[in-house]
Amino acid sequence: MLGAAGILFTVAPRVFGGHGRVVSHFLGHWGPVDGHALGVALAADPFGLAFALITTLLGTLLLVSALSELGELGPRELGWFACLFQLLLAALIGSALTADMINLFVWFEVAALASYGLTGFFLERPIALEAAFKIVVLTSVAGFLIFIGAALVYADHGALNFAQVHRALPGHLAAPDLLALALLTAGFATKAGLIPFHGWLPDAHTAAPGSVSALFSALMVDLGIIGLARITLQVFGGNAQHAALGLLTVLGVVSAIVGATLALAQDDLKRLLAWDTVSQMGVLVVGFSSATATGVAGAAYHMVNHALFKGLMFLCAGAIVHSTGETSMSGMGGLVRRRPLLTVGFTVAVLAIAGIPPMNGYASLGLIHDGVHHHTVVYGALLLAQVITIAALARAAYLTFYRPRPEPYAHLEPLRPGMRTTLILLGAACVAFGTVPGLLIVHFAAPAASVLLRPDSYAAGVLSGQADVPALSVSFSYGDVAHLLTTLVTAGLGAAIAVGYLRIREPRPIGWLRAVHTGSVNDYAAMAAAGLLVSAAVLVA
């Protein structure tokens, strides 16, 4: 993984230099002729290369933590685990750098294959096998939708290359193109865990080991986000964009609010974090679907930030389960004295996701909010989701770490060196990425937004081998009174709701939401099918 990072860093100066650049390579040198491509292209742009880099670096840390946590496994089992882990990381890197629809589908399937094995790796646990079965069913359906969507595009336009398809699409899309867009949207929304395509996510994140949950939540679900951003903004950009972006905005808002609400209702710590991932994916989708410079730049920035703080959260949760044997927050408490490193790490992650400066979530959330500020309903929905998110995570931090627990734990295993090192480095990264937002916005977030919002420049870079990204002005004032006041109000309201929720019975609407999630893969498949039909109706109508 470090070797892969080294190779990517050799390309980074060309891609991130100036205002950004798109650099492409056609495998086997099967390059385009007169703008028509037959070979499979890999393209490094500021958006994709940044995710590939964070995947290699964070993936290395997660792998170290996993091998440290599971060191008691035999060499054969540990080898298979490491193989699956790195296979999933390779798929994520490939998905970030590909410029071909079917090649993106291939990486989607490679990631899916590895995720099945990692979810059900410990075969003696029924919960792991059940979760693996759910992810097999739902992501297999998603992969089929992506394949059929790409096939429809190819049937009409004779192209699979992102750039060639973008140039081939007419100004007014026909019904087959709109249906293809609906299929692709549903397929990638399933991988991203957006409601109503999310049924696999809570179970898979809960059943897997802590390091695997961190890998799924911090990195794997972003494959769906990358697919949605590429298809909607770069391939279909300018064509039926209004309807597609409106659909994604609705899916994002619903996911953000419902995910945060169900996180607030959980007692299992890892399931709480899994539902929070559903919420954060919704926030990301709203940022990208805003199609504004600040919103898209904030979403690209927040995608990297989410990888850092959600990876840290899940590693802390996994370490708690590993150390204490407890999975429910009702059976925890008192860890602030017994496990200070875990307490600090989890608290840093909570502050980061709450957008408290100088943590990394402050600037990226501020940019997303600026990007949707002109849409009052969407802006208000994101603020509501943020308040509920803070409440859920503040409640989790109190019950797990700060609530007194008079009796000692029956089992309290010490943290291993690899786990300690990973927690410290991720906590430091959350602070570091929040203290230099101007640098990251200029050299990464703004170029990433530009290459997504200016699909013609991306197409030129892919087909010609190299092209500069147009300059895009994105600014964020760290000391802006409005941002600071918004952060203060949302944090205060979230803390107040957390305190109140500890003292009341579960509200009936939350009970209804929990009742809908029966745990049946049939019900979850029905939800996804309904989501596909609604998406197709919205886009094709």
Image (cartoon, rainbow, N blue to C red):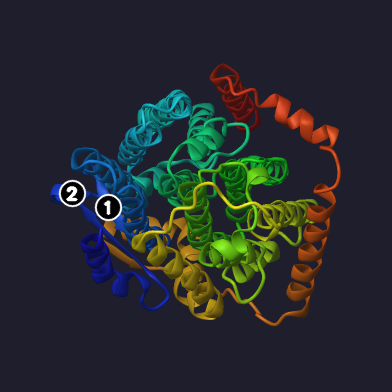
Rendered location of residue 39, percent (x, y): 21, 43
Rendered location of residue 295, percent (x, y): 62, 61
State which tag comes first along the sequence, 2 or 1: 2
434, above or below 507, in the image: below
| Snapshot quadrant of residue 337 | bottom right
Would residue 455 be found to the left or right of residue 524 on screen? left
Question: Is residue 43 or residue 308 the one in the foreground?
Answer: 308
Task: Determine if residue 464 is in view.
Answer: yes
Rendered location of residue 220, percent (x, y): 43, 46
Q: Which mark is residue 27?
A: 2
159, above or below 355, in the image: above
Q: Are marks 2 and 1 in contact (CB under 8 Å)?
A: yes
List the single residue furthest toward the left: 28
What is the spatial separation of the Cα atoms under label 2 and label 1, in whole angstroms? 8 Å
Callout 1: SS:
strand
Q: Which mark is residue 211?
A: none
Q: Residues within 10 Å of mark 1 (few under 14, many from 20)?
A: many
Quarter of the picture containing the C terminus is top right
Question: Is residue 531 or residue 264 the one in the foreground?
Answer: 264
Quarter of the picture containing the N terminus is bottom left
State the residue position of label 1. Answer: 42
Would residue 336 be found to the left or right of residue 49 on screen? right
| Snapshot quadrant of residue 466 | bottom left
Residue at point 67%, 63% (across, down):
354
Callout 2: SS:
helix
Residue at point 38%, 31% (across, down):
120
- What amino acid is at disc 2? Leu
Task: Determine if residue 138 is in view.
Answer: no
Question: Is residue 496 or residue 124 the one in the foreground?
Answer: 124
- What amino acid is at disc 1? Leu
